Image (spheres, coloured by chain):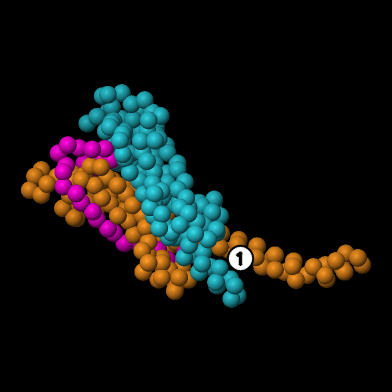
Chain colours: A cyan, B orange
Amino acid sequence: MKHFTLLLSLLVFVSCSGFTGLNNRGYTKTIAFKSVKEFSGEEIFIKKRLINFFPYDESEEVELKEHLLKFNVPANKEISIYKIETEMDATDVLFSLIPFVTSRTYKIVGMVADKK
Amino acid sequence: MKFFKFLKNYRPIFKATCQGLLTICTLFFLTNCARIEYRSKNSIPIYFSTNMNSTEVFEIEKKLQFFVWGLSPGHHYVDVDSILMANGVKEASKLHIHEFMNWTDKLVSVITLGLFVPYRIKLSGLMLKKGEG
């Protein structure tokens, strides 16, 4: 029981810490964040697992540019992101069992839409 | 007979392995720490890209609370528009979302053994200058 409590507290301590983020650097096309009622155009789905090796490693971020360059967006269109979800899935929990390692998964859903 | 002797010899190792596996399985199911969904209601224009009109930097921090290793609430919805509007932002560009826990949050999590897990999000970016828009 003693070990169980110790492990549990360690896990909560380690797995929930860390810094993660989402940013856009260097991608020049318009990326809007809005709720989309009518779905049209090519769907964009980005799934990225961020692993921090120390609790205060600030380097781990989802760089939107890296993922969005794969999509061919015409000049008269923009990218509309309508859902950003961050969670710890089963793999993240497994990674987080390792001391000083934290893991978190980002899911970003959007589409290529007409500019408004 | 040999099999039972074998079991008797390795009983402590077997017991420890079972306990370890049980602990890991329990933790595995209990730790579904902090699922956060960011969404927009289209109340104000928000862009991840740069908008030339927005020049003033903003930084907003919000505290989220999770209970029972993040199992309650299973899903935390963050209305980005509402938070920005409440802080006087009329249009945001270069939005940057940052998730973190500070030392106090971690300490609280450890003391409560994960029953209460505070979590912080920081929204930063550029907004229209005050008085504009």
Amino acid carrying label 1: it is: Thr
Q: Establish if A92 lies above or below A14.
A: above
Q: Residues within 10 Å of mark 1 (few under 14, many from 20)?
A: some
| Residue placed furthest toward the bottom | A2
Chain letter, disc 1 residue:
B
Query: Is A5 on the left-hand or right-hand side of A31?
Result: right
| Residue B71 visible to the viewer | no
**Depicted A72 relative to depicted A65: above or below:** above
Is A61 magenta? The answer is: no
Quarter assignment of residue B18? bottom right
Q: Does A96 sit left or right of B3 as displayed?
A: left
**The N terminus of chain A: image quadrant:** bottom right
Chain part drawn in magenta? B44-69
Q: Residue at x 27, y 24 (%)?
A: A75
- Of residues B126 and A83, the one nearer the viewer is B126
Residue at 42%, 46% in the rendered image = A106
Q: Is B128 rendered above or below residue A27?
A: below
Residue matched to label 1: B23
Q: Looking at the picture, how far across and down is residue A110, in whole percent?
A: 36, 37
Residue in the picture at 45% in, 41% down:
A47
